[in-house]
């Protein structure tokens, strides 16, 4: 049986403001952590052992996520110098002759995962056409005649054709991993690369012997930056909701006759869809969740467990709401997602990604469009880029943040974890973690009284 190695030891240095708390492989999208989506997809066609390699600091959270799932083993490392070193650790636990290798911060179409898993070509790579992506943003490959001919890292020019998503590698490849250099071979003249050991760098040495290319036919997401979370979330919300073919109610759940449902609904255990609720799309709801009193869903949505959505709030199409959230009293979620334990109410309007345990004060608002109609320029580790997906104008709030009354966020604002943005602040750009941003204003105090009215 071909075993599976999931690499989850990266620290997500490009994910600000979600780089400080936890592994990015556990960031929720459409109701579940990224890596859990992947393992569930694998379990649809194989019961093979899954070896997840992570850092010791993420070991507890990842173990908790997969607790009770048979055949999933978590292996912790104190430190990793890159994906090649992580894979070497994973291969040490294999009992078979080869393994399928995946990255824990990616989502790959299940049908393509199955094709790679069943291939008899070893070694092999699952490759997806670049499409609108730029090769200078990724580690890419040139594919010709069913083979990977060249692997290039953040290549300028147009010779690269595909991105590399996953691999099937023989156990003997461990020797090549041991020899992986601390630099990326074949870089373009004048470019720089970090001192890190990549699986793709190890593969470069074996290209003359042949690396079979299996071209992906479905969707592929590599969650490298925060807006990628929103892109994947929206896609999965529509994918999961689109798979509903009937309304299903689990034990103890109910839909009020006073709810207007124009679509299919899946309600988890003991959940309730109450009076004056309107659903114009398909809706997936977890356990012990209450949706009532005029809540409006303007399209497909996913809502977690132990959450309350009520009192004439509106959730737009493609959004997801996590576990233990409150969305109430005229609030609008006009795009994106709320992570676990987020409070959004009292006439708030939010567009973007709110991290875990974030509290939005009354009247918090997000700008969604610049006056020049262009996307904001984001800087990732100092490098400027324009996000073309539309989510560049979203607001990104890190974990454990809170806002005051009437806080305003300009398009593309990013706020680090453990930060307070005070009442009336006009927030823009990047705010570092563990900050308290307060408004300083000049006040004029004059004498005033009844004499001003002629007394």
Image (cartoon, grey):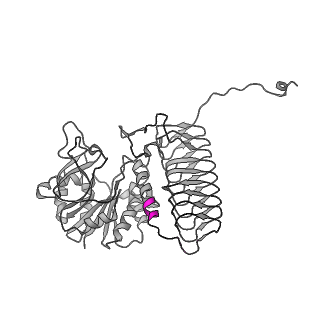
Q: Residue 361's x, y, as percent?
A: 60, 46
Q: Residue 200's x, y, as percent?
A: 22, 53
In the figure, residue 190 lies in which quadrant? Answer: top left
Q: Residue 48's x, y, as percent?
A: 30, 72
The residue positioned 61% from the left and 54% from the top of the image is 313
Residue 328 falls left or right of residue 356: right
Above or below, 322 against 130 in this view is below
In the figure, residue 92 lies in which quadrant? Answer: bottom left
- Whether residue 83 appears in magenta in the rendering, the answer is no
Quadrant in which the N terminus appears: bottom left
Residue 66 falls left or right of residue 306: left
The residue positioned 27% from the left and 69% from the top of the image is 3
Residue 419 visible: yes
Above or below, 266 against 191 in this view is below
Q: Between residues 5 and 213, which one lies in front from this camera angle?
A: 213
Residue 19 visible: no
Magenta range: 237-253
- Whether residue 250 appears in magenta in the rendering, the answer is yes
């Amino acid at each position: 049986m071909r075993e599976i190695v999931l690499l989850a030891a990266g620290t997500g240095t490009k994910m600000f403001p979600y780089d400080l708390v936890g592994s990015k492989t556990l960031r929720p999208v459409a109701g579940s952590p990224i890596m859990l989506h992947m393992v569930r997809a694998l379990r649809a066609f194989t019961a093979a052992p899954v070896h997840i390699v992570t850092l010791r600091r993420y070991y507890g959270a990842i173990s908790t996520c997969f607790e009770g799932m048979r055949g999933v083993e978590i292996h912790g490392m104190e430190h990793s110098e890159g994906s090649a070193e992580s894979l070497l650790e994973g291969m040490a636990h294999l009992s078979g002759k080869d393994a399928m290798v995946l990255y824990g911060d990616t989502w790959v179409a299940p049908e393509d995962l199955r094709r790679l898993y069943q291939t008899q070509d070893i070694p092999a790579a699952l490759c997806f056409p670049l499409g609108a992506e730029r090769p200078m943003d990724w580690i890419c490959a040139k594919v010709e005649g069913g083979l990977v001919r060249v692997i290039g890292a953040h290549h300028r020019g147009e010779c690269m054709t595909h991105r590399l998503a996953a691999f099937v590698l023989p156990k003997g490849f461990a020797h090549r991993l041991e020899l992986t250099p601390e630099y990326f071979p074949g870089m373009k003249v004048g470019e720089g690369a970090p001192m890190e050991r990549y699986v793709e760098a190890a593969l470069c040495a074996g290209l003359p012997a042949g690396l079979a290319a299996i071209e992906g036919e479905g969707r592929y997401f590599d969650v490298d930056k925060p807006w990628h979370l929103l892109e994947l979330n929206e896609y999965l919300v529509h994918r999961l909701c689109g798979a509903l073919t009937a309304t299903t109610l689990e034990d103890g759940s109910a839909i009020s006759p006073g709810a207007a449902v124009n679509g299919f609904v899946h309600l988890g255990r003991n959940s309730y869809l109450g009076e004056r609720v309107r659903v114009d799309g398909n809706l997936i709801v977890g356990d012990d969740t209450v949706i009532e009193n005029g809540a409006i869903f303007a399209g497909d949505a996913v809502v977690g467990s132990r959450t309350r959505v009520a009192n004439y709030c509106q959730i737009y199409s493609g959004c997801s709401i996590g576990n233990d959230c409150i969305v109430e009293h005229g609030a609008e979620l006009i795009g994106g997602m709320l992570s676990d334990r987020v409070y959004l109410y009292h006439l708030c309007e939010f567009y973007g990604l709110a991290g875990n345990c974030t509290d939005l004060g009354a009247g918090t608002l997000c700008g969604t469009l610049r006056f020049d109609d262009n996307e904001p320029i984001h800087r990732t580790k100092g490098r400027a880029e324009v996000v073309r997906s539309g989510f560049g104008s979203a607001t990104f709030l890190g974990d454990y943040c809170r806002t005051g009354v009437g806080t305003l966020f300009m398009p593309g604002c990013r706020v680090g974890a453990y930060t307070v943005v005070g009442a009336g602040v006009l927030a823009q750009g990047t705010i570092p973690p563990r900050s308290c941003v307060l408004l300083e204003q000049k006040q004029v105090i004059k004498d005033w009284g009844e004499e001003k009215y002629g007394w």
